[in-house]
Structure formats: structure tokens, C-alpha cells
């Protein structure tokens, strides 16, 4: 069972990234641009959210707090709040949910599994992973909103048509 916990805690995130990449591949040119922009903006927001949250609250990792609670894999004894893995998984869930609901639900379930496994592996407390998931989901929603505003603004100015006609004429 410990091997499964470690596998989920450390490596499931890579599978979620592959699923998100697969969703990106199925989009048309405009959808690819939107999803890519949302991912980049979302990553920036996640980074800012993690830094802000970690400065507002400090939570020693379970194995630091209780030396008898050994982690299932080597991990630095730094601030565990919020969970970076859970934040990244939450962001992926939010982004995929926008484009493919059923696949987004799968990614969301994977995000919850990662959060559970990080607690079960004794490298985070429950509050760390809940905060991480919240940061990731909020970053995804905010990124989608910001990119939508930017795209709308460019469309209102006729920028997409000019950009597309330049690309077509250069081909």
C-alpha cells in the first residue's frame, strides 16, 4: 500500500499534465491559444498564491511536528503550507474542466487523490492540501477570466482578424 501512496503522491501529477496536453491537442488553433494562455497565466497566479499563502501561514510538515511520523519518501523539512502538488493539480483540474467536463472530472479526482496521498505519505497535513487545491482552482478560474477579458478586448479592436489575415498571407 505504501508503494501506491508514493506513486500517487509523487507521479500522478505527470499523468494529469499529459491529460491536459491531450485536451490541448484536440483544440483548434484558437482553442489551443486560449488554453495555453490560461495555463501560463494560471501558473503565474499559482506561484503568487503559493508564495503569499506560505508567508501568511507556516505549517511544519508532519514528520517535523512528530518525529515518529516518518515520511514515505525523502522530503525537505520546509514549510508545508500550501501543498505545491495540490495547487498544480487543482489548476490542471480547473483548466481541463473548462474544455472537457468529463475529463476534467477525472483530473479533479486525480487532484483529490494526490492531495490524499500527500497526507497519507506524511509530507503534508490536511489543511496544506486543501489550501493547495483551493489556490490551484482559484488560479484556474482567475486565469480563464483574465484571458477571456484579454481575448474579448482584442476582438473588439479587430485584432484577431488582422493577426489571422497576416498569418494567412505569410503562408
Image (cartoon, helix red, strand yellow):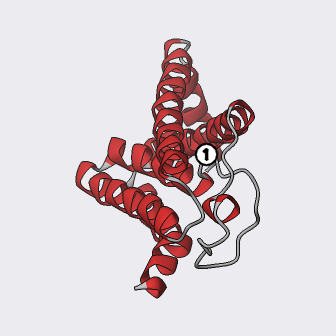
Q: Nearer the viewer, residue 124 or 104?
A: 124
- Return the residue found at the far top: 156
Q: In the rendered picture of this protein, how many numbered marks are placed on residues?
A: 1
Q: Position of residue 40 (x, y in %)?
A: 63, 43
Using residue 89 as the reference point, say whether residue 81 is left or right of it: right
Q: Nearer the viewer, residue 36 or 163?
A: 36
Residue at (41% x, 43% y) in the render: 94
Q: In the rendered image, is residue 127 in sight?
A: yes
Residue at (76% x, 62% y) in the render: 77
Q: Position of residue 44 (x, y in %)?
A: 68, 39
Residue at (70% x, 41% y) in the render: 58
Q: Where is mark 1, residue-wise?
A: 82
Using residue 30 as the reference point, say whether residue 72 is left or right of it: right
Residue 44 versus residue 83 in the image, above or below: above
Q: Nearer the viewer, residue 148 or 105?
A: 105
Q: Quadrant where the N terminus lies?
A: bottom left
Q: Position of residue 7 (x, y in %)?
A: 49, 80
Residue at (61% x, 45% y) in the render: 82
- Return the residue found at the far left: 102
Element type where label 1 sits in the image: loop
Residue 98 versus residue 115 in the image, above or below: above
Q: Nearer the viewer, residue 161 or 20?
A: 20
Q: Badge 1, how many Cα within 10 Å: few under 14, some, many 20+?
A: many
Q: In the rendered image, is residue 17 in sight?
A: no
Residue 84 versus residue 34 in the image, above or below: below
Amino acid at each position: 500500500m505504501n508503494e501506491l501512496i508514493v506513486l500517487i503522491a509523487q507521479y500522478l501529477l505527470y499523468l494529469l499534465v499529459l491529460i491536459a496536453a491531450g485536451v490541448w491537442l484536440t483544440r483548434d488553433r484558437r482553442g489551443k491559444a486560449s488554453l495555453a494562455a490560461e495555463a501560463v497565466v494560471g501558473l503565474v497566479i499559482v506561484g503568487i498564491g503559493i508564495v503569499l499563502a506560505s508567508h501568511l501561514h507556516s505549517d511544519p510538515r508532519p514528520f517535523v511536528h512528530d518525529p515518529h511520523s516518518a515520511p514515505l519518501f525523502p522530503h525537505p523539512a520546509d514549510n508545508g503550507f500550501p501543498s505545491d502538488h495540490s495547487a498544480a493539480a487543482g489548476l490542471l483540474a480547473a483548466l481541463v474542466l473548462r474544455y472537457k467536463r468529463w475529463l476534467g472530472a477525472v483530473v479533479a479526482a486525480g487532484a483529490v487523490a494526490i492531495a490524499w496521498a500527500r497526507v497519507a505519505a506524511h509530507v503534508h497535513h490536511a489543511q496544506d492540501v486543501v489550501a493547495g487545491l483551493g489556490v490551484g482552482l482559484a488560479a484556474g478560474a482567475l486565469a480563464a477570466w483574465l484571458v477571456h477579458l484579454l481575448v474579448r478586448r482584442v476582438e473588439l479592436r479587430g485584432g484577431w482578424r488582422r493577426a489571422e489575415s497576416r498569418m494567412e498571407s505569410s503562408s
